[in-house]
Amino acid sequence: MHGTGNDFVLLDARTLQQDWPALAIKMCHRHFGVGADGILLIAPSKRADYLMRMFNPDGSESEMCGNGIRCFAKYVMDGGLLPAKRTQMTVETLAGIQQVAATLGEDGLVQRVRVGMGAPRFTPKDIPVAANGAARIVDHPLHVEGGPFHVTCLSMGNPHAVAFLDQPVDQVPLEAVGPRVEHHAFFPRRVNFSIVNVLGRSHLKMRVWERGAGLTLACGSGACAVAVAAQIKGLAGPSVDIDLPGGTLRVDWDGAGQVWLEGPAELVFRGHWPDR
């Protein structure tokens, strides 16, 4: 499945036991596996309708994935794993309980999904970043080869650093710069790094280097982080459309509470992975 080009292999893991990090490494390989930006596991939850776990191509586990949870919701709803064709559900993640609502297409299948991504967190220990005493990390100079970048840092359940640029984001060698930022000492748990052009107060353009995955066509939590960072810097209003290489996402934030992410979710194909 994919959400704006951010692609995942979904597994019904309610009765399965596996070495999930090892499986993610094999399955996500784009030449010797299926090829994906991560695997998503459907598992039982005592706190929500279902539990979602997400493993990156390097085997690391992510706290949250905004594009992934939309695919997760489509899989669950279209697959009849909720009673009475419900179009709302709750999903437990490592970042907390997420609220999800779907819009159906004419075929009765899920077409778009709106997700409550939780409230952003700004304190250094919550992101986390190696800084003390600051309430918010805004325009922090990050010195890496290919930089420096002035980054705004926050957590959307996972750590994000956002840099607003005058240079077109398409001209930035993100495949070279991204790993340097991800593994910078300022980020003790590594970081997702987004670069952004402001096209208008309700229109942004971004590219992203994802922690544990590398260059991806979209990042849902990253889009939320970009929208929040743009608003606190006075560059955007409460509702923005964000263009990514894989498509456009809509993000709404009232400046205080939960961030809402909306975008498509699509099934690509079904297959069988041999137990080997």
Image (cartoon, grey):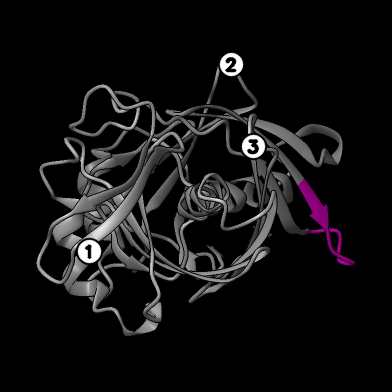
Of callouts 1 and 3, the N-terminal one: 1
In the figure, residue 253 lies in which quadrant? top right
Which amino acid, mark 1? Gly
Q: CA distance from mark 3 to mark 2?
A: 28 Å
Which amino acid, mark 3? Gly
In front: label 1 or label 2? 1
- In this rendering, position of residue 141 left or right of residue 195: left
Which amino acid, mark 2? Arg
In front: label 3 or label 2? 3
Q: CA distance from mark 1 to mark 3?
A: 28 Å
Residue 267, how many percent across, how many down? 61, 65
Residue 5, how many percent across, how many down? 50, 70
- In this rendering, position of residue 259 left or right of residue 155: right
**Residue position marked by numbered label 2 in the rendering:** 47
In front: label 1 or label 3? 3
The region drawn magenta spans 102-109
Of callouts 3 and 2, the N-terminal one: 2
The magenta stretch spans residue 37: no
**Residue position marked by numbered label 1 in the rendering:** 178
Which dot marks residue 255? 3
Q: Are marks 1 and 3 in contact (CB under 8 Å)?
A: no
The residue nearer to you, when weighing 144 against 245, is: 144
In the figure, residue 99 lies in which quadrant? top right
Secondary structure under the numbered disc 2 in the rendered image: loop
Q: CA distance from mark 1 to mark 2?
A: 36 Å
Q: Are marks 3 and 2 in contact (CB under 8 Å)?
A: no
Residue 179 in view, yes or no: yes
Of callouts 1 and 2, the N-terminal one: 2
Quadrant including the C terminus: bottom left
Secondary structure under the numbered disc 3 in the rendered image: loop
Name the main secondary structure of what is drawn in magenta.
Answer: loop
The residue nearer to you, when weighing 55 against 181, is: 181
